[in-house]
Image (cartoon, coloured by chain):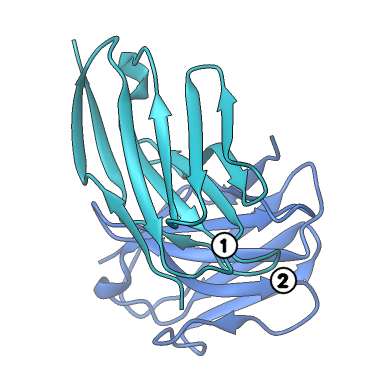
Chain colours: A blue, B cyan
Amino acid sequence: GAVVSQHPSWVICKSGTSVKIECRSLDFQATTMFWYRQFPKQSLMLMATSNEGSKATYEQGVEKDKFLINHASLTLSTLTVTSAHPEDSSFYICSAEIPSGTQYFGPGTRLTVL
Amino acid sequence: GENVEQHPSTLSVQEGDSAVIKCTYSDSASNYFPWYKQELGKGPQLIIDIRSNVGEKKDQRIAVTLNKTAKHFSLHITETQPEDSAVYFCAASRQRDDKIIFGKGTRLHILP
């Protein structure tokens, strides 16, 4: 199957700082990538849909100025959590879509904000 | 919008027995139904998927069935093994580039 990587796998930061998470499709090009967050023992919650070369589409209730998404190439999308606070601590997961519509997920990034 | 219900939330099965997880969806326009397995601290892994033009699909010990009329689909795992222990998510989607709607997950425990 298609391989999606995320970097970093985990990050700890101080409250008020910004954190950037990278999502890469390693062996295919993805015009569409998705960003999710997942709280412990819960399902995945879609945050935004990222399309290469255009602005991301955010789900209702997700602050676009706080969660900045950039999809500058067909193999890379980034999520920047700006001015992070403890309530932003979560497991962030990206997925990349292949032409058939199947989504492959990255391994996730665990963010802890102190 | 689409709503996906998944049952049960927790399932314990003796090693070697079969496990069945069931999902229902609400949007009749949904035509793609993937199943993901998530181990602790990892991202979801696609294990099998089915499209609406097919009623059943099998891959070794894993099979998925789809009933479009009733709007429900199921995951069947036979001859369960300890490594099958994980959280399983069903999902539904309408078309390419469209978002996937996930069920709430089923925590599967394989008992020795």
Residue found at x 34% / y 16%: B80
Pair 1/2: label in front:
1
Find the distance from the CA under tag 1 to the CA under tag 2. Answer: 22 Å
Give the labeled residue for mark 2.
A71
Tell me which amino acid carries mark 1. Answer: Ser
For the residues tagged 1 and 2, is the chain the same?
no
Q: Quadrant of residue B17?
A: top left
Pointer 1 with pointer 2, Cβ within 8 A: no
Judge from the rendering whether residue B67 lies leftward or rightward of residue B98; answer left or right: left
Mark 1, secondary structure of its residue = loop
- The C terminus of chain B lies in which quarter of the figure? top left
- Which residue is painted at 59% across and 32% down in the image? B57
| Pointer 1 residue | B93
Q: Chain of mark 2?
A: A
Residue at the limit of the structure toward the front, as seen here? B69
When the figure is inspected, residue A91 is found, relative to residue A48, above or below; the finding is above
Q: Chain of mark 1?
A: B
Residue at left 34%, top 13%?
B81
Q: Is residue A89 above or below residue B85?
A: below
Relative image position of residue A41 (x, y in whole percent): 23, 51
Residue A35 x %, y %: 53, 66
User: Is residue A12 at all visible to an observer of this figure?
Assistant: no
- Crowd class of label 2 (few under 14; some 14 to 19; many from 20; radius 10 Å): many
Q: Quadrant of residue A23?
A: bottom right
Residue B61: x, y in percent?
Answer: 48, 18
What amino acid type should be assigned to the residue bearing mark 2?
His
Report the side of B15 relative to B63 (left or right): left
SS for callout 2: strand
Q: Is residue A33 above or below residue A27?
A: below
Query: Is residue A52 visible to the viewer in this orientation of the structure?
Result: yes
Q: Position of residue A109 (x, y in %)?
A: 45, 53
User: Which of A46 and A63 lies nearest the eye of the viewer?
Assistant: A46
